Image: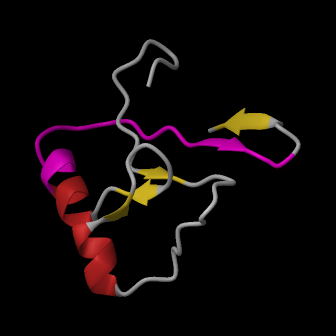
Amino acid sequence: MNTDGGGWTVFQKRGDYTPREDFYRTWLEYKRGFGDLQRQFWLGNDRLSIMTNQDSYRLRVDLEDFDAQKRFA
């Protein structure tokens, strides 16, 4: 991700894709991760745990609505 200097890891992506990825999943599926990394996905709780236990990190949340209005926090 090349936002705000880069170096960001995207761990969830959702969008208006066909077919739609179903995010109504079991805990085990969220643990392992699912989806297509080029479209919609959840990276996986296990991977997030490994990554975030290595150092301190900042979280940036980028959102875009259906009218293409973008915000971040």
How are the colours assigned in the image? secondary structure
Write down the region rendered in magenta.
50-66
Across and down, in percent, residue 22 comes to 53, 75
| Prevailing secondary structure class for the magenta stretch in the rendered image | loop
Is 56 one of the magenta-colored residues?
A: yes
* Residue 55 at x, y percent in the picture: 16, 38
Residue 57, above or below 13:
above
Where 21 falls versus 8 (above or below)? Answer: below
Q: 54 left or right of 2? A: left
Q: How many marks?
A: 0
Q: Residue at x 11, y 42 (%)?
A: 54
Q: Is 60 contained in the magenta span?
A: yes
As rendered, which of 57 and 41 lies closer to the eye?
41
Residue drawn at x 37%, y 29% is: 8
> In which quadrant will I find the C terminus?
top right
Quadrant of the rendering where the N terminus is positioned: top left
Q: Is residue 49 left or right of residue 33?
A: left
- Counting from the top left corner in percent of width and height, residue 3 is at 52, 20
Residue 25's place in the image compared with 19, above or below, is below
Q: Furthest residue to the bottom?
A: 26
Residue reaching furthest to the top: 5
Residue extending farthest front? 19
**Viewer-closest of 49 and 31:** 31
Residue that appears at 53% across and 67% down: 21
User: Looking at the image, which residue is at 30% across and 37% down?
Assistant: 57
Viewed as shown, does residue 34 lie left or right of 39? left
